[in-house]
Amino acid sequence: MQGRISTEKRHTMPEVEPSKRILNFSEVMLGYDEETARSEARRCLSCKSRPCAKGCPVSVRIPEFLSLVAEGKFEEAYAVVRSANALPAVTGRVCPQETQCEGNCVRGIKGEPVAIGALERFVADYHAKFGRDSSAPQSNGHKVAVVGSGPSGLACADALIDLGYEVTVFEALHLAGGVLVYGIPEFRLPKEIVRREVERLTSRGMKIVKNAVAGKSYAVEELFSEFGFEAVFLGTGAGLPRFLGLPHENARGVFSANEYLTRINLMKAYEEGAETPLYPAKHVVVVGGGNVAMDAARCARRMGAEVTVVYRRSRAELPARREEIHHAEEEGVAFRFLSDPVDILVDGDNCVTAIKCIEMQLGEPDASGRRRPIPKAGSEFLLSTDCVIMALGTSPNPLVGRSAAGLEVGPHGEIKADEDGRTSLPGVFAGGDAVTGSATVILAMGAGKRAAKAIDEYIKAKE
Ligand code: FAD
Ligand code: SF4
């Protein structure tokens, strides 16, 4: 096998050039055409040991789908992907492939890995244009409730529908999709695609009740006693933003990335006359270095601001996807590495005027394995700004945990659940960010899928 590995380059995906794309929120990456997709798929070596598939949290049969793409059998390729992955058009766009399937690809040892994510996106988009969905199997007469319509809830619902369950999803917001609709911006994941994927599930029988907040509109127990569900999956995510606890963090012009992104993505603040407008700002400072920070920075650029990302480690430790960092830099986002905020300065109206930071140096690795940032005494500096966006991670919202008597939760509000999603309450399962804290779309989907299997076993055991 080694002898066959060449350094042949992979096909780049066309994208909108930076000067044009920062003028709007349209999708940046434009996708492969059929010929390019076939040619890229032909780069796959069909390795017997399938290392790429081992890197996939939902176990997509990657070499099989790639060989079908290479033959031009796009619908068959889609069927292979779809049999393991409920949302391929989404994961093809947002998965951190470089640390999963593509990170394990043998082609990557001496050259560039096969563009597995781009090909997953291609087959999903091809299917949306030309394919037909299979109908749901006949109902087995059992009813399951899913709370939360993010990737974990949707993957759980999809797997349950495949097994014949009648699934109702209860969602707190007025739109289904979780972070896919309120967090990840349109230019990375068009909302039309999320709508299409949700509709595919509703056309297979999934019911959605929107504006329905567990712990406020109804208690988890009522889903059993009042509504007659036999099991409940909690996929309520981790939507509670963290702050640094700095003086003036509640000043005008300081936002959590969650609020900033929700105003833009869910409430379309960039549209003329939007009912939920955005704070007007000329120079935005984003604190953090993950995908959420990159999304906030790139949105702020599109809203016309100069943007600086402040991150306390160095470039090498940035946790965001490589593509997002590259795109942010191309779009003119500036970075201040090895810098940590210590204060926010305000004027007489409590509006932000500057952020005070201190320079950091990297010490020994900490519990996360990354080198610990240590402040350099006397190295404080000021950055002028009229808006600060905190992108420091999120925790699960404690509402659901508090409202379900006997449901065990951890110190950060995370629901305690085993590998298959079983919680401390019989018949109540949980997965995704609500259990792990903020993670990734595909890990949330994997958890939803495993929980669906455990729910099936639980209900069958009662028969
Ligand atoms: P969520 O997607 O958070 O969905 C939870 C749903 O539950 C929401 O719709 C919420 O409204 C609903 N809910 C909450 N409480 C209640 C309640 N009490 N009653 C009813 N409904 C409720 N991951 C990647 O893999 N790649 C990326 O590029 C990426 N970028 C990201 C960018 C941003 C800005 C953010 C915030 C996250 C990003 N992530 C990314 C992480 C990823 O989106 C999450 O890990 C994933 O969405 C978690 O899925 P989930 O189903 O557990 O929760
Ligand atoms: Fe193909 Fe790469 Fe997977 Fe090998 S590791 S089968 S080359 S995608």
Image (tube, rainbow, N blue to C red):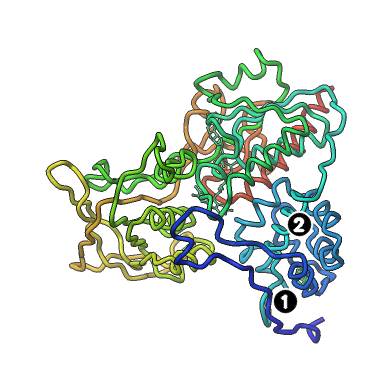
Residue at the image position 71 percent from the left and 51 percent from the top = 88
Looking at the picture, which amino acid does disc 1 mark?
Arg
Query: Mark 1 vs ligand 2: CB under 8 Å?
Result: yes
Q: Nearer the viewer, residue 264 or 375?
A: 264
Image quarter of residue 240: top left
Q: Position of residue 209 (x, y in %)?
A: 62, 25
- Residue at 25%, 52% in the rendered image: 386
Mark 1 surroundings within 10 Å by alpha-carbon count, few (fewer than 14), some (14 through 19), many (20 or more): many
**Label located before the other in sequence (2 or 1):** 1
Question: Which x, y percent locates residue 37?
Answer: 75, 67
State the SS at label 2.
Answer: helix
| Ligand 1 image position (quadrant) | top right
As drawn, which residue projects farthest toward the front?
272
**Vertical placement of residue 344 versus 30, above or below:** above
Pick the residue in front: 132 or 356. Answer: 132
**Residue at x 64% of width, y 62% of height:** 97
| Kind of residue at disc 2 | Val
Q: Which residue is mark 2?
A: 123
Which quarter of the image is occupied by the C terminus? Answer: top right
User: Can you tell which mark lies on residue 107?
Assistant: 1
Whether residue 328 is visible, yes or no, is yes
